[in-house]
Image (cartoon, coloured by chain):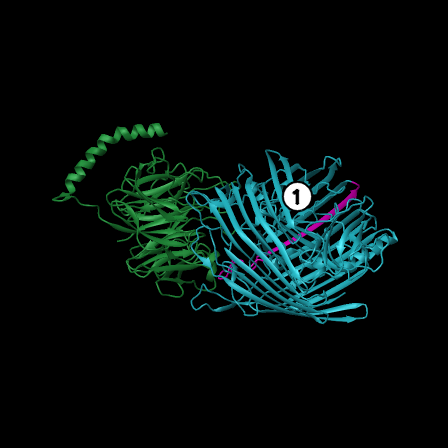
Chain colours: A green, B cyan
Amino acid sequence: MEGRWGASWLASLPVWLTTAVLVGCADSGPTGPEPPQAFDLLVLNSTGQTMARFTVAEEVRVAGSKVDLGPNFDGDALDVSSLHAVSTISSFGGSRVVFVELETGTVSTSGFPEPEGNLANPSQPAFDESGAVWVGGRGSDAVYRVTPGEAVATRIGEAVGTFVERVVPIGDELWAVDANIDDEGFTFQPLGPSRVVVLARSGEVRRIIELPAGAPNARDAVLSAGRLVVLAGGTFDPVTFAPDGNGAIVTIDVADESLSVPVPLDGNGIGLESGRDGLIYVTSTTDFVTIDLLRFDPATGAFQRGPDNPIRIRDAAGSRVDCWTATALADRRLLCATFSFAEAGRLLLLDSEGRALSEVPSGFGTTDIRLLE
Amino acid sequence: MKSAGSAVFAAMLATAAVAWGSAVTAAQARVPPTAPGGTASPDSTFLLEVKVVSEAGERLSGAFVEAHALGSEGSVAAGTVVQLRPEGQVHVGQLSAGVPYRIIVQAWGHERTVRVVEVAGETARFLRVVLPLDPYLLPEIEAKASGSPVAGLAGRSVQRVRFADRPLVYGSVGEWLAEQPGVTIRQRGAGGRQAVTVRGSRPEGVLVLLDGAPMNDPLTGRADLSLLPPSTLETATLVRGVGSASHGPGAGAAVLLLTSRVPDGRAASGSLAVSSFGGRFGNAYASAVGRRGRASLSVAVTEAENDYPYQNRLLPGAPTERRGNSDYRSVNSAVSGGMGPVLASVRLDRAERGVPGRMGTSIFESARWSEHGWTAFLSAESAGARLNASMHSRRQVYVADAESPESVLSSREWRVSGRTAVGDRLGILLSGRFSHESVTGDELGKPAPRTMTGGSLERPVRAGRLLLEPAVGVDVTRGAWAVSPGLALRLVPASAWSMWVRAGRGFRLPTFGDLFFASAYRVQPNPDLVPETVRLDAEVGVEAELGRGGWRFDWALDVYYRRTADPIVWLASATAVWSPRNLGDLLAWGVELDGSLKLGRAEESGWRLRLSGSLDRSRLGFGSNRNPLPYQPEVSGFMAAERWSPWGSLRLTLRSIGSRTTSVAATRRLPAFTVVDVSLTRRIPIRLLALEIMLRVENVLDRRFEMIELFPEPGRRFHVRLQVR
């Protein structure tokens, strides 16, 4: 592998040199090339129970101290608005929505209404354009709305599904992704096809879009290029928990609700992120140990770097890196983070081909990255 | 067999006078004024004739006796005076009248016994010592003749308590352990499981043997001490340091040896206790001796609601809530019997409790857990050889709520061990052990039983004031084998102090949970694990005693270091699927200090002040991480002030635990805390009965703390205990 990688790198060297010269010339001023635009980003450390801030320019650097999200924190997804970051705590920690003021780092939490209370088991949260957060209840099968400072979320829709993983606000509607798996029996096996339940913001169900059978266990979705891109995580062996390798990407045209044919991952899906370059970055695994990074173009509905040609992520020493989650800057540079429980994970700034440009420790158990505006 | 009964009765009398707070079996004996065979000596010295017999009344031919002058007045030079006779009578010569001596009596396969002897003016004395059979701990010491090899625990720090002597003091084994330096009890709130860590270890690094059978959970490798009330136990012995050479796998940092109550002459006792938050306890014990042997029965019933208030710090304003589903009920019983050198026991332990989970969540508000277990033990001894057999069976049931199916785990393990000396001149001690474990469970698939065979070879060497103990253990199981060497050295430069150095290696096998546990969601076992290995466990210690007249000061200082390679740790993979892995290394090192000052000449009344503490550093190393081991306090201390008299006793203790991290990520630290307990005991003799009433206030200052994050401990608690003997 090292030899092939070396040969590949050498083969592409002239292209890279030419590109670098062109980019350098284009950006040259009287005093030389201008540095890339700086971005701030947030990283969620699920097992470290912290949120960390970094700055990306030519390299990635730590920006400030970590925010302690509390002893009961166990969320794995993050979203940001201009003022707040939001994540969630599962029913093991009492079912809470966690807000962090970006300016001060102040942490506050909101609960869920009775009777489900701390059994609501919230899913991945999402801000809408007004600053409200929409979240599904994996345990309560409901959809909630909550704003920072509210003590208790408001239940909007009930009996939305069996395992609501994500609520995506689109226009005046809510598109709720229901994995439709058995969580009450703790088998987490599919009860039927995954679904997208379309609700009015007032909560009534308007339509149900059933996903194809080749897209089991829908676990995340993002809106991009007028399509809802849904990640079907795939199933696993109920005894050994070995992955079945049947994850897929399905897109739904928001305008006419037409479904694409599932695009197989040849593995089980882990993460789905929308890049600033307009492309979708998907992580998948075939063994729950190694992870591939794929690049999906929502406009064409096809992979640019699919399972047979994943982005090969290497650190500065040339060693393989398995990223739980990854996204891209507008200049197509990549950011990826590893999930590690025994030591701090790694946050890498990469070129578009996955070669490391810079690296810092991200924290314990990193599961999400969010670029700030 | 009449002599057996009187011997047992004598032993009971001797042990009844054990000093309060002593960690070993120690008794001060007034030597009878006349003695057969004694000879007078000039200048107020005398010859002490020690007769050592077993509980069965038989003379112990291999006894070993040491006499140490307490304080500096003794005309006996520092060290040991030993004269051995094969029939079990020992003459210890040239002792000074008016000087207290510590007489240490040891015999192969019997409990080490310490007596303090002082003779006021007479010239010849006779002392009879009855050594109880020690069926569980492989013999500490053997002596065939003067100067012969001695094997045992020379290079170790050992603490022992005889619960029967302190029936009201300790409500749990954990309470006693928490007073020992370098020991931490991890508990998930009142009524929760109690796990013990020693010298910066993890709980699975401490092998807990009850009547020779492992109590460590086959799934987790951790022993739950909350299941065993002290009232059904005879002794607890904590042997620090790796113990694989003697005990095989599992004893990476320490061995905790627990023994069920054994016959103790003709006696009966009972106790009742009530405490805050619905605590109720009762126990009864009866012992009898007859022509054919001896037998005892011990039964204990425990109940507690544990519905104590706590502050939910996860919610704004930290409102006060009441702990729920943390009730606990148990029934424990032990039957023990013996005939001559044969001892057998059977005990039944049954417990049922709620599993309340962390504060702030109701997901476990109906979760219940129960365990039924039985342990059988048989020990037999003949001249020069010893055989022990233990069997332990348990069934654990967990149910998430009333509507969920039960999750059942059953396990059974039996062990046979033996020991013999190979020739008097060779001085080699040979031990063998064989164990068989089998486990079945809903989430375990079909794990194969595990059989392990092992043995050890020891060749102690004694030269003057130097004791050298080399040993090597070998254990073999399918797919794995381990060699566990050890070397200990003890030097006794003077009677008042000694020092020791020890180094050894050990190992721990993956648990059945590590290898086979396959819960349906995000958990995978790892059949490719290798045993974790204690590459080096070493310590250097010194202990001394100072005393004159009415005071005595004992102290010990110990420095330890341990490196464990490939520790087995459950971790989430790169995709957050949980699985055990061999992970880098685990380094632990620290300092332990223990000092005790006793004031008062008489045993019936006096003062004692004890101070102990430890500095412990433990680092889990993986990649670039060297964060502290979670929940390991780096500083801990204990202080006890006691006053006792024939009227009763007053005991004030102060236990301090330093701050500790809550995860490998070390994001947060739980704050340090100090807990003060006070107990007052009144003794009321009524004819042949000894009635004791104890009032105890636990956590007097009502400190609120958590041993495990988000598992609140109760605040102030009141106990009333009543004991009749």
- Which quarter of the image is occupied by the N terminus of chain A? top left
How many marks the image carries: the answer is 1
| Residue located beneath label 1 in the image | B467
Residue B427 image position (x, y, % from top left): 72, 37
Residue B431 image position (x, y, % from top left): 70, 38
Residue drawn at the location 73% of the way across and 70% of the way down: B646
Q: Nearer the viewer, residue A4 or B111?
A: B111
Q: Please identify the residue farthest to the front as the structure is shown.
A: B43
B686, above or below B205, in the image: below
Tell me if residue B378 is in the magenta stretch.
yes
Q: Amino acid at mark 1?
A: Leu
Q: Nearer the viewer, residue A180 or B227?
A: B227
Residue A254 image position (x, y, % from top left): 30, 49
Residue B217 image position (x, y, % from top left): 61, 48
Chain letter for the residue marked with disc 1 in the picture = B
Label 1 Cα crowd, 10 Å radius (few <14 / some 14-19 / many 20+): many
Q: Which residues are magenta?
A: B354-383
Tell me the SS state at disc 1: strand
Quarter of the figure with residue B30? bottom right
Q: Nearer the viewer, residue B677 or B495?
A: B495
Q: Can residue B14 be seen?
A: yes
B224 lies left or right of B585 = right
